[in-house]
Amino acid sequence: MVTFPWLCLWHSCVKRYPHCCPGSHSAFNTDSNTSGMESQNLVDDLSPKKNTVIKVNGPVVGSRKRPSEGNYEKEKEHCIALFDQWSEADQVEFVERLISRMCHYQHGHINSYLKPMLQRDFITALPAQGLDHIAENILSFLDARSLCSAELVCKEWQRVISEGMLWKKLIERMVRTDPLWKGLSERHQWEKYLFKNRTSEVPPNSYYHSLYPKIIQDIETIEANWRCGRHNLQRIQCRSENSKGVYCLQYDDDKIISGLRDNSIKIWDKQSLECLKILTGHTGSVLCLQYDERVIVTGSSDSTVRVWEVTTGEVLNTLIHHNEAVLHLRFANGLMVTCSKDRSIAVWDMASPTDISLRRVLVGHRAAVNVVDFDDKYIVSASGDRTIKVWSTSTCEFVRTLNGHKRGIACLQYRDRLVVSGSSDNTIRLWDIECGACLRVLEGHEELVRCIRFDNKRIVSGAYDGKIKVWDLQAALDPRAPASTLCLRTLVEHSGRVFRLQFDEFQIISSSHDDTILIWDFLNVSTNGQSEGRSPSRTYTYISR
């Protein structure tokens, strides 16, 4: 379509400001002597004609009504001068009128002209207005790859990133949100350079820029060690004169606390592997335990639950309720749940270590209740009767039963919607607790699956076959994943049944009927000539007196 934008502009200018164009307004005069129809005819004469289109080897090109004459430049400058005198609102309205009278081809030209004008380098513009902190805050949301690209845009962007210490902030964000990053920061001691204001102790941004790829390399190495089974092995020999077996354990960065068949609780230094303390008082094997910064709570085959002061080892409380062995217990946020060979589950209120009262007894299982776990919503229990039962934490009312295992269930862990259980049918099952559906069955162990733990990436299981297996949790939750791809590694070092294990991003710590505690370290791996999956071990033997 062919249009004359300059003529439309001129027409509007003349109508609005006739006094500025003497002798010209008469041609467009629409006073009372000119009818409305005549005025409309004048406008129509100036409108684009739909039939004035020519094609020149491809794109459509509009042609002018008449050739450009010598007075066009003068008319254009005059109209621009008028345009400059108007208010912004009037200018916008006038341009909208012009654009509405143009064809699609002209709209394209205008769009191409406006696009670069509308683009703004706000990262460069903000510091010029004294708003460096806003530019830094915007760029602080970038991931590592995008931050690298941003540094290459221009010197000003690079300056904002450097002075804003954005690589430091990126690492701090990862440490806050990812346990693997947090663990690396503590073990490699670069945590001391984080979460500090700008002081002389804080290295420049370039330090954090170079640190980031080193951290990524460490993470990739750890993941490869897990997949390939490469580890450094440390061994604690716990044997005493009259018993054999380490039934339970828990650890932190400083210590390992274990419950033994010889009725004792032994506390080990995690670095030196030396026995720091022995707690005695139970008259039967210590079958389960849990501790926090204040207390250790243990359950025994003597049917009692004991509460110990964690630093002194003093007995603070003894709970006598169950009629048979206390097989498992969990406590958190003022609530404790215990379960027993007597087929019952006891729910306790823990106001303090010395003020613990029975809230409710849950009855429903038809065999020994081997394990319990809970959160704010559900209590989950598993039994030798082949079932998993779900109870309301707040009301202690029964909710549902999960059926599927063909034999008794020895272990489980519950978190969010996921329950993972191990059974004497030699299988591991994954369940959706909300609907009760079995999501996956893992097969591979040759005997009873005695202990199981999972995090966001892996399931680690231990069985009476003496083996520890590492499974890919995300693949197990994907129904399309072949069963043959789910077991990442099988670790064989124990010479007896595996009773208990715990793990984090860097290690597995397990205990066994063979009287040992093994520390499988996937971070500090020696590679000098060791075969895959095997590493030299350091052994510490403690003989009780």
Image (spheres, rainbow, N blue to C red):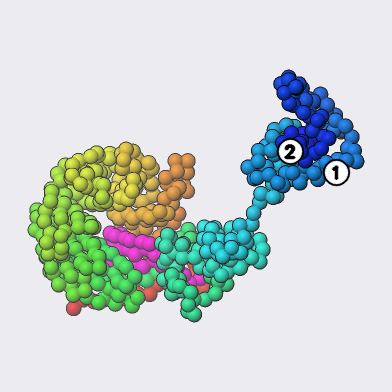
Residue 236 coordinates in the image, percent (x, y): 31, 72
Q: Residue at x 62, y 61 (%)?
A: 124
Examine the structure image and report whether residue 68 is included in the region drawn in magenta: no
Quadrant housing residue 186: bottom left
Is residue 32 shown above or below 453?
Answer: above
Magenta span: 498-527
- Main SS of the magenta part reads strand
Of 235 and 57, nearer the camera is 57
**Residue 225 visible in the current orientation:** no
Q: Is residue 327 left or right of residue 502?
A: left
Q: Is residue 17 left or right of residue 422?
A: right
Of 52 and 203, nearer the camera is 52
Q: Secondary structure at mark 2?
A: loop
Residue 486 coordinates in the image, percent (x, y): 44, 49
Identified by mark 1, the residue type is Glu
Of 450 and 59, nearer the camera is 59
Q: Return the residue at label 2.
A: 17
Q: Secondary structure at mark 1?
A: helix
Q: Is residue 407 left or right of residue 231?
A: left
Identified by mark 2, the residue type is Tyr
Residue 172, which numbered label?
none
Residue 47 coordinates in the image, percent (x, y): 77, 28
Separation of marks 1 and 2 at Cα, in angstroms: 19 Å
Q: Residue at x 24, y 39 (%)?
A: 400
Q: Residue at x 14, y 44 (%)?
A: 363
Q: Residue at x 16, y 58 (%)?
A: 350
Q: Is residue 106 left or right of residue 422?
A: right
Of 93 and 520, nearer the camera is 93
Q: Return the residue at label 1.
A: 73
